[in-house]
Image (cartoon, rainbow, N blue to C red):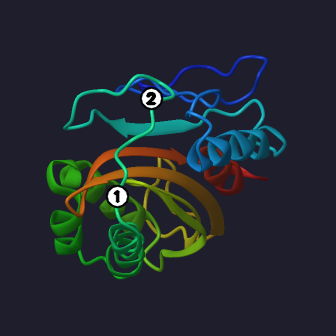
Amino acid sequence: MHADQEPLGARGPELHNIGPAWDANTGGGSRIGEILRRRETHFKSTRLLGASIALASIAPLHPVRRPGMISSVVSSAETEANKANIRRYVDEALNRGILEVIDETRGELAQHAKEKVVAWRTAFPDFHTTIETLVAEDDWVAYNVLHEGTHEGEFEGVAPTGRRVAFRTMVFNRFADGIVVENWGLHDHASVLEQLLAE
């Protein structure tokens, strides 16, 4: 278990972070908050019960908002640009390994993102990500993706098995001037290990 993980309680997976306070019971009644609540329920209903889930988060560059506060209202054009930013990140960085895109779109959060992408693409050279859900509200973008790949490099201490795996990630990004300034990512690494270590 990683240092920033906690064991699961009776409620199932808990959202754990090293950044601003946020949980599935807040969100100010916004669409993003509702998606978070629905996705937490989804994860609870799957085989992830009893497994450890790593939630990677980075402290924001802006002052921390109190739970439930609505973020800045932005134009519809800016909202669409933020969604396009995510599509580009998935297509070019995750699927093609073009790390420069991460520097251009993630600012001071780029280093952590690059480490994650490199780790995934090293463990799964044919790594491919498909966006299943992508929604935006004000300066937030939420998306749910499916990752697939063949295990040909070490992953979480597991030597290459040659097995084909699939797992999901749920991400919430807050944007400022076209750059991601707050990142929350719930990576289903537990199911990857389950698939790799299955008899």
Q: Residue at x 55, y 20 (%)?
A: 6
Q: Residue at x 23, y 64 (%)?
A: 178
Q: Is residue 147 left or right of residue 64?
A: right
Q: Is residue 83 left or right of residue 196?
A: left
- Quarter of the figure with residue 10: top right
Give me the C-alpha separation between circle 1 and circle 2. 36 Å
Q: Nearer the viewer, mark 1 or mark 2?
A: 1
In the rendered image, which residue does mark 1 sit on?
A: 74
Q: Position of residue 140 (x, y in %)?
A: 42, 52
From the viewer's side, name the closer residue of 3 and 138: 138
From the viewer's side, name the closer residue of 75 and 50: 75
Q: Residue furthest right?
A: 45
Q: Residue at x 67, y 44 (%)?
A: 34
Q: Disc 1 vs disc 2: Cβ atoms closer than 8 Å?
A: no
N-terminal of the pair, mark 1 or mark 2, is: 2
Question: Which class describes the residues within 10 Å of circle 1: few (<14), some (14-19), or many (20+)?
Answer: few
Q: Position of residue 162 (x, y in %)?
A: 58, 71
Question: What residue type is disc 1 on?
Answer: Val
Q: Position of residue 176 (x, y in %)?
A: 24, 53
In the rendered image, which residue does mark 2 sit on?
A: 2
Vertically, is 165 above or below 31? below
Q: Is residue 195 left or right of residue 150?
A: right
Vertically, is 190 above or below 23? below
* Label 2 residue SS: loop
- Quarter of the figure with residue 19: top left
Q: Position of residue 151 (x, y in %)?
A: 54, 67
